[in-house]
Amino acid sequence: MERKDEKFVFGQELDFEELGGGVKRKILAYGDDLMQVEVHFEKGAVGAMHSHPHTQLTYVLSGAFEFNIDGVTKTVRAGDTLFKLPGIVHGCVCLEKGVLLDTFTPCRKDFLK
């Protein structure tokens, strides 16, 4: 899966990683300091509450999600963006089948095999 620092990454050529429970992801472009990941959710799928030492932006491409970030819960839809600082506990429930675009800094090396 070594695509580090690739200038062009074509999503149609990438395989999904099945995470279980109606969630799957594609690792898109990445380098040491930045990573982008496309995450697909079936209705009712859960992104378990967790935290990590990365700053994360999440852009909602489609669907609807109930997100909890640091104890605050809101419903978000296509076009909305979420900002998560390092160490902040967050998670979601998918209300309508959808897709999220996650951007991390630095790279989530734990996602790479």
Image (tube, rainbow, N blue to C red):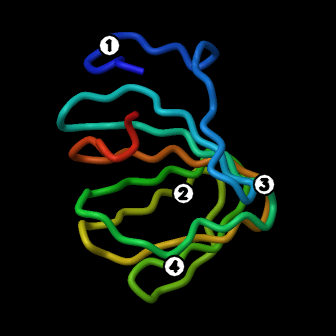
- The secondary structure type at the circle numbered 4 is strand
Residue type, mark 1 in image? Glu
Q: CA distance from mark 1 to mark 3?
A: 30 Å
Residue type, mark 3 in image? Glu
Residue type, mark 4 in image? Asn
In front: mark 3 or mark 4? 3
Location of mark 3 (residue) = 42
Q: Residue at x 66, y 66 (%)?
A: 65
Q: Is residue 13 above or below residue 109?
A: above
**Callouts 3 and 4 close, C-beta under 8 Å:** no
Numbered label attached to residue 68: 4
Q: Residue at x 36, y 63 (%)?
A: 83
In front: mark 2 or mark 3? 3
Image position, residue 77 (x, y; %): 65, 60
Q: CA distance from mark 2 to mark 4?
A: 14 Å
Q: CA distance from mark 1 to mark 4?
A: 33 Å
Q: Which residue is most to the bottom?
A: 71
Location of mark 1 (residue) = 6
